[in-house]
Amino acid sequence: MTYLALIYVFLKVGLLGFGGGMAIISLIQGEVLSRGWLTQTEFVDIVAISQVTPGPVGMNCATYVGYAVGGVWGALLASVAIVIPSLVIMLTICYVYEAIRNRFQQNKTFQITMRVIRILVVLLVAHAAYTLMTPASFIEYTSWIIFAVVFILMLLPLFKKKSPATCHLSPATCNLSPATCHLSLLSNPILLILLSGLTGWLLYA
Amino acid sequence: MILQLFWTYIKIGTFTIGGGYAMLPLIEQEVVDKHHWLDGEEYANMIALAQAAPGLIAVNSAIFIGHRLAGWKGVLACVLGAVLPSIIIIIFIAMFFRDIKDNPTIEAIFKGVRPAVVALIAATVIRLATKI
């Protein structure tokens, strides 16, 4: 029964997973928490490991949740199930693409549909972030400091036009102060997870 | 050809740490610059379609490239290449992590990591909202 539920959940996530990794993680979160398969902290730990491990985050998260719920078979079933909707839809798109080629990007209906999907994805991810802000993950005020620092560092690249790499080499050409430019090199999820792990070790061990 | 597709996507699957938009430059490098499987414009179209379709962008691009270059066998080779590294590495980590999870040092590390993960998700909201 668990296996069937896993297949169903990950087929659904694969079918509705518009908008890339974080959107897919938000969908998985909703399913896993509402079914009581994992606790919130277990899920957050899985997301952290998925981020720092090689491979697309969404795939890592799906495999890991599958393993946590149903062992090795669970991991395999979840990984296959999440790919199947992609196979059906992308192959259909491939056939249609040959016929319409470059015209689809200018198509009005296509543009409007994409915009609606992007708005829904923002709402979905916002809801996921909101549900995770609980005492289980925020044990004391230091947690909020870690949250605030990571949040601000991740948003720094939005305030400049140059990519972090070139910006760091020539701070004069970038519209942020040199110090902020160097800081924006830190806006890398993997690095931030490793640094926050180090912080946790120093603070709580 | 099939082996080359498989191997290329094994590389893409392994070296896209963090996933999402981090892997697009790597895919471009392999598919356009190195193997000349697609030209720049077709690559841009492929990425637009891979993002528009539901599912993982890496897997969607794998399906497109595989189908374009070698039909059904190509699709299988590329998709397997894209997902196998994740599956193998994660199963190993999951087995190992179950045994060390209750270790006080590991627990302390994750106490620091959890608010950071929530911050990553919250920052994604803002980053995506600016692209609407």
Image: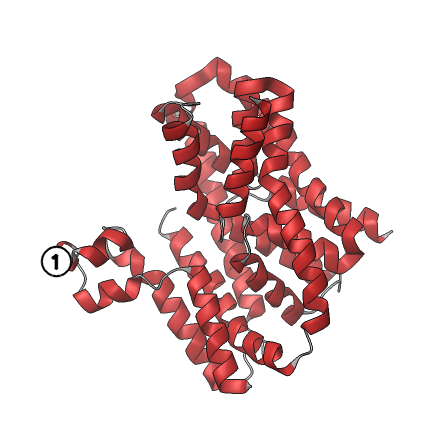
Name above or below for residue A48 compared with residue B69.
below
Give the residue at x 48% y 47%: B20
Name above or below for residue B10 compared with residue A106.
below
Give the residue at x 47% y 53%: A122
Pinpoint residue A44: horizontal percent, then vertical percent. 60, 66
Graded by Cα atoms within 10 Å as few (under 14), some (14 to 19) or many (20 or more), the crowding at tag 1 reads: few
| Three-letter code for the amino acid on which mark 1 is drawn | Ala
A154 with respect to B9 (left or right): left
Decide which of B23, A112 is in the foreground and name it. Answer: B23
Q: Is residue A45 visible?
A: yes
Most extreme residue toward the left is A172
Name above or below for residue A152 compared with residue A162.
below
Name above or below for residue A134 compared with residue A60.
below
Residue A15 quadrant = top right
Give the residue at x 35% y 26%: B40
Most extreme residue toward the top is A99
What's the chain of the residue with tag 1? A
